[in-house]
Amino acid sequence: MEPRGPVRAVHPEFASLTPRGVSLPAGDTHRPAERAGTAPGREAGTGMESGPAIFAGTAFALFGGALLLWTTVRVRHGEPVVLGVAPRAAAALTGLAGVLFLLLGVWCFGRI
């Protein structure tokens, strides 16, 4: 039986998983070329790994911003931020959480 597509080399870690009697082509594994501006120790990939960082950064930044906005509106209207908790403590803790989520979003964007 002839292979349908181009023959590709198999990474050595996966070569041991092949069934007995099947031979695989030997060769170097694909290593992406280093890109200008890439941080030391990080390989330049295809850019697909930036998708989750963009999604997570957006989610964290939106949540943090919304939490800060909601807390600010509740405090300015004199309404409780958290029921059954001292108003200053609740505003401080939710404000801190909002800032932390914003910083986490900025950190995710910095990983791109």
Image (cartoon, grey):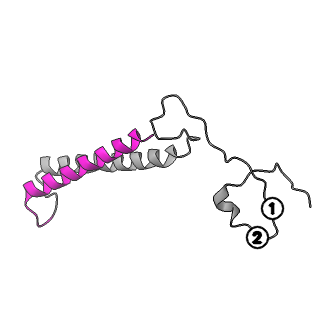
Q: Nearer the viewer, residue 63 or 45?
A: 45
Residue 94 part of the magenta segment: yes
Q: Residues within 10 Å of mark 1 (few under 14, many from 20)?
A: few
- Could you tell me how many numbered marks the image carries? 2
Q: Which residues are magenta?
A: 83-112
Q: Which residue is mark 1?
A: 23
In the picture shown, does residue 57 fall above or below 83?
above
Residue 98 part of the magenta segment: yes
Three-letter code, disc 2: Pro
Label annotation for residue 102: none
Q: Nearer the viewer, residue 22 or 71?
A: 22
Q: Position of residue 97 (x, y in %)?
A: 23, 53
Q: Position of residue 87 (x, y in %)?
A: 9, 57
Q: Which residue is mark 2?
A: 19
In the picture shown, does residue 14 fall above or below 60?
below
Q: Main secondary structure of the magenta part?
A: helix
Does residue 40 appear left or right of residue 61 in this picture? Answer: right
Does residue 76 appear left or right of residue 4 in this picture? Answer: left
In the picture shown, does residue 58 fall above or below 86?
above
Does residue 94 appear left or right of residue 12 in this picture? Answer: left
User: Residue at (13%, 52%) from the top-left corner?
Assistant: 92
Q: Position of residue 43 (x, y in %)?
A: 53, 40
User: Residue at (8%, 54%) from the top-left corner?
Assistant: 88
In the picture shown, does residue 19 fall above or below 73?
below
Q: Position of residue 23 (x, y in %)?
A: 81, 62
Quarter of the figure that contains the C terminus:
top left
Circles 1, 2 touching at the beta carbon (< 8 Å): no
User: What residue occupies the far right of the structure in this picture?
Assistant: 1
Gap in angstroms between the C-alphas marked 1 and 2: 9 Å
